[in-house]
Image: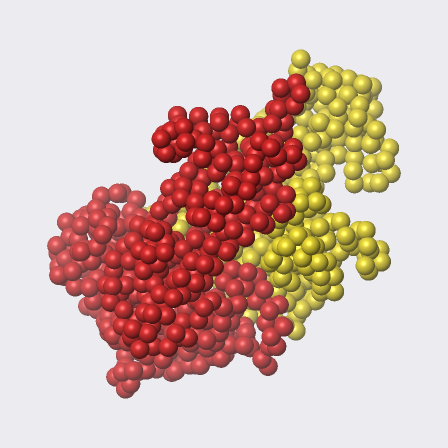
Chain colours: A red, B yellow
Amino acid sequence: MASTKASKEQKYDRQLRLWGDHGQETLENAHVCLINATATGTEILKNLVLPGIGAFTIVDGHTVTGEDAGNNFFLSKDSIGKNRAQAATEHLQELNSDVSGNFVEEGPDKLLDNDSEFFHRFTIVIGVQLPESTCLRLGSVLWSASVPFLVCKTYGLIGYMRLVVQEHTVIESHPDNALEDLRLDQPYAEFQNHIKSYDLDSMEKKDHSHTPWIIIVAKYLEKWLSEHNGQPPKNYKEKEAFRQLIREGIRKNENGVPEDEENFEEAIKNVNTALNPTKIPSAVEDLFNSEQCKNITAQSPCFWVMLRAVKEFVHNEGNGSLPVRGTIPDMIADSQKFINLQNVYREKAMQDAAAVSKHVESLLQSVGKPAESIPEKDIKLFCKNASFLRVVRCRSLAEEYSVDTVNKDEITSCMDSPDSEMVFYLMLRAVDRFYQQHSRYPGVYNYQVEEDISKLKACVNSLLQEYSLNVNIKDDYIHEFCRYGAAEPHTVSAFLGGSAAQEAIKIISHQFVPFNNTFIYNAMSQTSATLRLLELNGNLPFADLFSSPNLPM
Amino acid sequence: VLFFSSREKKRRRIEDLTEKMAVDSGHRDGGCDWDGRWNHVKKFLERPGPFTHPDFEPSTESLQFLLETCKILVIGAGGLGCELLKNLALSGFRLIHVVDMDTIDPSNLNRQFLFRPNDVGRPKADVAADFINSRVPGCKVVPHFKKIQDCDESFYRQFHIIVCGLDSIIARRWMNGMLISLLSYEDGVLDPSSIIPLIDGGTEGFKGNARVILPGMTACIDCTLELYPPQINFPMCTIASMPRLPEHCIEYARILQWPKEKPFGETSLDGDNPEHIQWVFERSKERAAEFNITGVTYRLTQGVVKRIIPAVASTNAVIAAACATEVFKIATSAYIPLNNYMVFNDVDGLYTYTFEAERKENCSACSQVPQDLQFPPSAKLQEVLEYLTENASLQMKSPAITTTLEGKNKTLYLQSVKSIEERTRPNLCKTLKELGLSDGQELAVADITTPQTVLFKLNFTA
């Protein structure tokens, strides 16, 4: 029984506050494919069904074993002997009646043999516990079809994810600590006029203490510029002097004691960030210089058309700057002063967005497309997020695995750090190699653990040799991976389940930034790393060991 | 420290490590287990390995301990709680209790996957327990539909490990305080068998953290209270006369208009009542229109009134998984546990950071040292009260202060009982000297953030 609009609003309320109704719409239009309904697979899917993806299809030719039913919440004892795709679909379907669940009782290899375009219909394909050959084959098919592919694996206490997507654009990246776009260093005409409308010295006490700090900084900056040859405060000493200048502006009572003017304290506190020069972020400059931006065609996705329009704006009406964002932070001020100031920014933002729209129109016209193909509200959203645009490009699996294009330098430099998670990446590759050779994973049965150690070591060595990797992998890791016996403990599956599902949501919604492109989770130490095994022509010389350098708390 | 060797778990060397089959060394548990059921778990309990805890010995006894003896308490059956119950059940734990005072709301259904639309209104603990018990044969989850404060010492003492999936710092601190109160010291030395490990998880949108607390040994919740900065409320003058944001308009309707206009009689504002929210929404819109403020929506109104924190299934899944992994490590000594704090954030890629939170020497909860209160004798009691609530390391909510004067117990101030509040209110304006307090005087402070009173020592300054 499908939910009503009202009941969906209620159900999804907590997540709508994160990605909005438009984000939810993208989820509800998505069809996700899961290959292999192992514990990891069903955990990932659970975290996609609950938030309401439109549909899922599980592809799995395996029969449920006792082992499967032991670590998988979406299989029961009764599922044993049944096809795993079917059994899992039944239990997952119960989670959300708005979602349409489907299953195919066949493995991906067979499916591809019979229908090479089977996977083209999906918004994203998530492959779990795939052997290397199947993974590479799928990778190639999905790459050609431009279908995002998320590879996931739980192996003992190690979790692994690999995102494979040619080009993923993000307009709404929702950065955690975004700098404000205040234009104090280059006030536009309307802002200048607004500043002029204030005369701090002649104001009544009440107005003086309720003037927004932005105005205060602007006024004192004018004073400073006139006294310093048009040069703003640049170093610490000058900024201190500037702060002092503002402090002297605080009204004093009849005894010469400074009044309590919190708005002036706010101004002083914000001097540092307020004086940040308005600059186009280098990431955005790079996008301006990319091929997709330079060559707009009828096939160009909207993102690139809008980006090109913004670039044109920057070189014309924008005088070298992006469209004004139009938001200001809350600050101590009376309602009217604040709203009036806010409106100055809002109106400028609207103006700039309109100018960008004109460029969008002429670009669309030039490639024979109607102006309506990119709605006004999309252009406004784009302009508002112009500083935060991101494009994620992941190399193909073929490139990662090819001897010619493997990035040796990164692997070697990571392995120089004793605690690097890179060793687990190499062990997973070695284990895949073992499977290729022996048609099984190492150490599955107790009696195999000891004897497989030397076999696995041989796989490690042949791997390192084949890729000319001059690194050393301690025997302990080889022993540990034999000990794992390809176990898929539930808690590690669940960790990966949450991680992978959110990355899939990012791909589907185009909000927030996906990882790029290999993620390793180590449940022994509760640590993780994102490895970015770049092309040889990539910009960064080292693999990123963390996605972002700041402590989030 | 190997927790359970001295308690219930007997250690025996595994007799035969070269069994032909990895699995099925006897169905010890009778009917509800099946072939291969615990294969994934057994590999970590029955095999030696290079990264195990130094005291770990492979054995078939460990699994039996999990299945038959190890008792875990899960606090909360919500976003984290549902995940925790599933994770523990599928890791071999069978004796699980769960405490939750809430009933199921439609907005829970996007992530609290043990609940269905038909369950709305029922107690979370009950529904969660039923679901797990029926999906995972042999698992015996016992629900408790009550507040954590309604359970006593003897209840908590029975558990080997306690894992929290709470949505309130106050509740966390209370739980923290409870476990600290269970510690026993002999000649000033902590008795390890009185320690109940506390695994604590928290999430907010796309951020989360998981931590391992060994009460009396490692950093406790209060040791790191500054990591949770106090919730900032809007200043009253902004709300009353200088609104700038739609939120200010909503707070105006909630804090000022509702008590004044009493639109539904004497009923207090209930964030879960759509009629109440609608009323606040409409008043907020009127207020906003007066000041030319845009942006008041029904969703925003509800968010502000209920202090809603956005939530998704994925973050809860990640944090609960990390917590459950730690429960498993501690229960089995399979690996060295997290030492001791992990943060997670997947707004931009995926980010984790793991560090060791340090104990605070004079922690008000776990240091056993009376807290220092430095005030001049001319300070008013009101100042002491403000210090207790505003200080970042204390963050008390509604402290009740008592002391001993002339051999008798005297309440200096208590807010939670109306008659006592009225009687003791004049004390707030009196100085510490006027109240008869002397240098070195001990004050006992009770508060909802802790089950035990906190001892303070007055240190008179000039």
Please tell me whether residue A548 is drawn above or below residue B143 in the rendered image: above
* Residue B271, horizontal then vertical, whole percent: 70, 58
Q: Residue at x 54, y 77 (%)?
A: A98
* Residue A149, horizontal then vertical, whole percent: 32, 69
Q: How many marks?
A: 0
Q: Residue at x 79, y 40 (%)?
A: B416
Viewer-nearest residue: A82 or B8: A82
Q: Residue at x 14, y 49 (%)?
A: A470
Viewer-nearest residue: A164 or B354: A164
Q: Please identify the quarter of the rendering in which residue A295 is found.
A: bottom left
Viewer-nearest residue: A90 or B329: A90
Q: Please identify the quarter of the rendering in which residue A232 is found.
A: top left
Q: Residue at x 55, y 47 (%)?
A: A341
* Residue A526, horizontal then vertical, whole percent: 40, 49
* Residue B46, horizontal then vertical, whole percent: 39, 56
Instruction: Please indicate, yes or no, whether residue A530 appears anywhere in the rendered image.
Output: no
Instruction: Please indicate, yes or no, whether residue A412 appears anywhere in the rendered image.
Output: yes
